[in-house]
Amino acid sequence: MKISSVVFALLTRALLGDWCLAINVTITPYPFTVAQEGQNITLSCVVSQRRRNAALPVVKWTFLPAGTDRPEDELLIARVNMRKARFYGNYTKSFTWPKLKLTVVKQGKIFDLVILNVSEGDRGLYMCRVQEFKKHQDRWKASSNCTAATELRVTVEWTLSGSSEVEDVESYFHPRKRRLLIPLWINSVKILHQVAAQHHQQEGLMVFCQRLQYTLQCLEQCFLAEGNGLPLDILHSDEYKALKAHLSHNSLSSWKLVEKFLEGKVWEQKVYNGEKYGAVTLLASYRRSDQRLRIEVLNAMNLLPMDSNGLSDPFVQLCLEPNHIFPEVEPRCTQIKNCDLNPLFDEAFEFLISLEQCQASGACLVVTVFDHDTLRTDDFEGEAFLGLKAIPGVAGQMEGNELSLHPDAVPAQIRLSLMHPKPKDDNILRLLESRRGEREAQAYAKKRRQREKQSQEGI
Ligand SMILES: *[C@@H]1O[C@H](CO)[C@@H](O)[C@H](O)[C@H]1NC(C)=O
Ligand SMILES: *[C@@H]1O[C@H](CO)[C@@H](O)[C@H](O)[C@H]1NC(C)=O
Ligand SMILES: *[C@@H]1O[C@H](CO)[C@@H](O)[C@H](O)[C@H]1NC(C)=O
Ligand SMILES: *[C@@H]1O[C@H](CO)[C@@H](O)[C@H](O)[C@H]1NC(C)=O
Ligand SMILES: *[C@@H]1O[C@H](CO)[C@@H](O)[C@H](O)[C@H]1NC(C)=O
């Protein structure tokens, strides 16, 4: 069994001079390399002279441990002088066995540093500092210098093998060891959150968030380790939940977002109390045999007066949404009832739509009451959302030919309170608005914003 985790290393600010005029120093691998704990790794410093000159290089390998970034924290590993003599520095001295080895592969040109048996403490920035010396009137004087750096990251791997396996398994699942995973998980979530927040462009955000969402899922599985890793209550931290919500919202297509918006409205309608803006009564049913949704608008009551005479001239508009599910279905309207706050309509409408359309997510009937105005645009009395799944005949599975045997559903009388939207209240609309490239998303958000302008909730 193998349980591996990644030790994150922050890229330390490189403390590099900018004097590489006459010489060119590079390190491979660059800009970082990842080693597994226990491995040997070789870093290679290549020095080349830009101009032919008689200068000789003095090469120093230095080390800046991960988590430090002050010049005084830099430790000398090893140095090769002009006469090829090698000296080891203060960092090398802290090891009791020969852990670091400097090899001159090609005099004056290639200087390899071998790090044996890599451990977590070896994480950090490795620098190759080259100082050129020139002979000037029989004395060597420092001329140009140049520095290159690379970062070593270390992967810690718990490999449980060999004779001590049983013991190791037990010690790994010892709570003390498992705790090691907690900061790693917290950090991973934090980093993903930062990455998600850094993406400011709306274009491509959806795909980007879908990928991050997948990454988060994989990471979670990894830390869960089939029940042997971290428990769910630790995995599902507040930051994890916030990130997950953010990603799942942003991962949705605009159509899905509109569906979510409408589902939210249907829910809002269900829990809405009071009839501050009046109500509408309908008789609704769906006949599977000929795919007809029948809506009878019975009456409206307690409407708000919109005209100066203290009355209104109401009519009811029926609209099937979302538009991508009902692209061909035009809104239908009742007749206008003049000067009446409790009008009786008794008008029936039929919509020819399939059962799949009715059962699609977000599918709903938007009932809007307007006060007709001959001179200005019609005033908004209120709106209501009826999820089609609630209509008799829609709910339940479709069972092929058996359908025709089912007796037609008995219409239900439904009373819907009229609502006004709360302006600037909805995250989904904000998200739709931000998708500038998408015309349909923009159009839908615009339509809802116009409705919000007519709302009395914001006043
Ligand atoms: C420095 O050397 C490396 C390889 O030795 C080479 O790829 C790179 O182009 C050189 N850079 C400059 C600025 O000469
Ligand atoms: C690392 O190098 C040492 C000395 O050369 C060698 O004995 C050892 O087997 C190497 N280890 C790995 C993992 O390659
Ligand atoms: C290590 O050696 C370098 C070079 O001799 C020196 O500048 C540095 O202060 C030393 N660091 C420590 C911690 O002794
Ligand atoms: C490798 O390093 C670890 C400590 O990091 C030490 O316990 C182990 O003995 C070392 N192995 C070898 C082969 O030097
Ligand atoms: C590198 O060269 C620059 C410019 O010649 C000089 O200012 C600087 O002190 C040199 N650095 C070292 C470490 O010799």
Image (cartoon, rainbow, N blue to C red):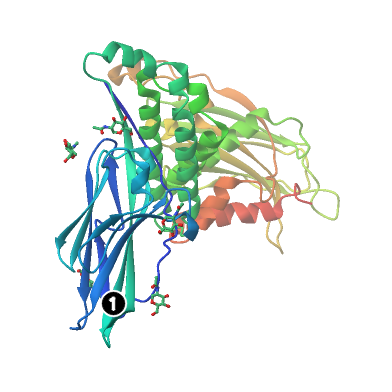
Spot occupied by residue 342 in the image (x, y as percentages of width and height): 76, 38
Q: In the rendered view, tell whether residue 400 sits above or below residue 71.
A: above
* Residue plotted at (22% across, 61% down): 85
Observer able to see residue 161: yes
* Residue plotted at (37% across, 43% down): 94
SS under mark 1: strand
**Callout count:** 1
Residue extending farthest to the front is 138
Q: Quadrant of residue 22?
A: bottom left
Residue extending farthest to the bottom is 137
Question: Which residue occupies the foreground of this view, 338 or 381?
Answer: 381
* Residue plotted at (75% across, 50% down): 458
* Residue plotted at (47% across, 17% down): 175
Which quadrant contains ligand 4?
top left
Q: In the rendered view, tell whether residue 28 sits above or below residue 9.
A: below
Name the residue that disc number 1 marks: 133
